[in-house]
Image (cartoon, rainbow, N blue to C red):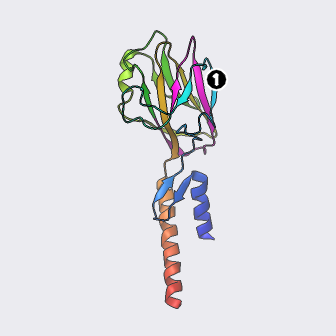
């Protein structure tokens, strides 16, 4: 019964215990690698020029591999959206790769913004901001208040942003790790006792 409760707790938080004994957090973003095109995502606004491309290395950055979302607009802004079923009070690790075809060029009004709920975690608006593009994956810590809208909004009149490898994973709390270790000790003791009796 205790083991069932332990495993149920992991399931709610999106944590899996693999066969090798390691802990693996599930990516709560549906199709975050864009391997299925835009399945799971909603695209709104001036998005006619946006698409998914299997060659994400458009800016010469070899760290961007696989598929990417090509965020490009014509006259106004657009948004790429997905609702995530997050648990209130739980902390999450939010990561994604971002680059641009011309990383040092921003037209007047161009921007790229990443939000979880009402919290803006990244807001690029000027050429100096472009130094962040393509150097390392963007990564943020976010504490949820419940189901949360993931919102990438953008406008780039003479450029294009490349977005890939979007993930939101739970950050295990100390008590979760304690619960996991207690459960493993309990299971190990039971198995050892069973073997001794056999």
Mark 1: which secondary structure? strand
Taking depth in this image into account, of 22 and 172 the one nearest to the observer is 22
**Where is residue 68 drawn, in percent x and y?**
50, 32
Up/down of 198 relative to 146, above or below: below
Q: Residue furthest bottom?
A: 198
Q: Is residue 17 visible?
A: yes
Up/down of 145 relative to 193, above or below: above
Q: Which residues, given as a range, are shown in magenta?
A: 68-96
Q: Give the residue displayed 57% in from the left and 52% down from the top.
A: 13
Can you tell which quarter of the image residue 130 is in?
Answer: top left
Up/down of 189 relative to 129, above or below: below
Q: With 79 as the anchor, is 161 left or right in this view? A: left
Up/down of 64 relative to 7, above or below: above
**Where is residue 75 drawn, in percent x and y?**
57, 10
Is 148 covered by the magenta stretch? no
**Is the N terminus in the top left, top right, bottom left or bottom right quadrant?**
bottom right
Q: Is residue 148 visible?
A: no
Q: Residue furthest front?
A: 55
**Where is residue 154 drawn, in percent x and y?**
53, 21
Q: Which residue is mark 1?
A: 44
Q: With 95 as the anchor, is 130 left or right in this view? A: left
**Where is residue 135 drawn, in percent x and y?**
35, 31
Is 75 covered by the magenta stretch? yes
Taking depth in this image into account, of 121 and 82 the one nearest to the observer is 82
Can you tell which quarter of the image residue 99 is in?
Answer: top left
Circle 1: is it few (<14), some (14-19), or many (20+) Cα within 10 Å? few
């Amino acid at each position: 019964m205790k083991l069932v409760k332990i495993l149920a707790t992991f399931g709610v938080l999106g944590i899996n215990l693999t066969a090798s004994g390691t802990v693996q957090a599930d990516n709560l973003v549906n199709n975050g690698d864009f391997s299925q095109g835009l399945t799971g995502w909603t695209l709104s606004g001036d998005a006619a020029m946006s698409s998914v491309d299997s060659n994400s290395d458009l800016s010469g950055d070899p760290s961007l591999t696989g598929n990417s979302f090509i965020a490009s607009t014509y006259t106004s802004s657009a948004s790429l959206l997905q609702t995530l079923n997050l648990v209130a009070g739980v902390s999450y690790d939010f990561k994604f790769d971002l680059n641009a075809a011309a990383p040092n060029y921003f037209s007047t009004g161009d921007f790229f913004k990443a939000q979880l709920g009402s919290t803006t975690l990244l807001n690029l608006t000027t050429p100096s901001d472009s130094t962040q593009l393509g150097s390392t994956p963007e990564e943020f810590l976010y504490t949820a208040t419940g189901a949360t809208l993931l919102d990438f909004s953008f406008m780039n009149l003479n450029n294009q942003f490349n977005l890939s490898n979007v993930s939101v994973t739970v950050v295990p709390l100390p008590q979760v790790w304690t619960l996991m270790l207690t459960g493993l000790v309990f299971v190990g003791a039971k198995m050892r006792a069973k073997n001794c009796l056999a």
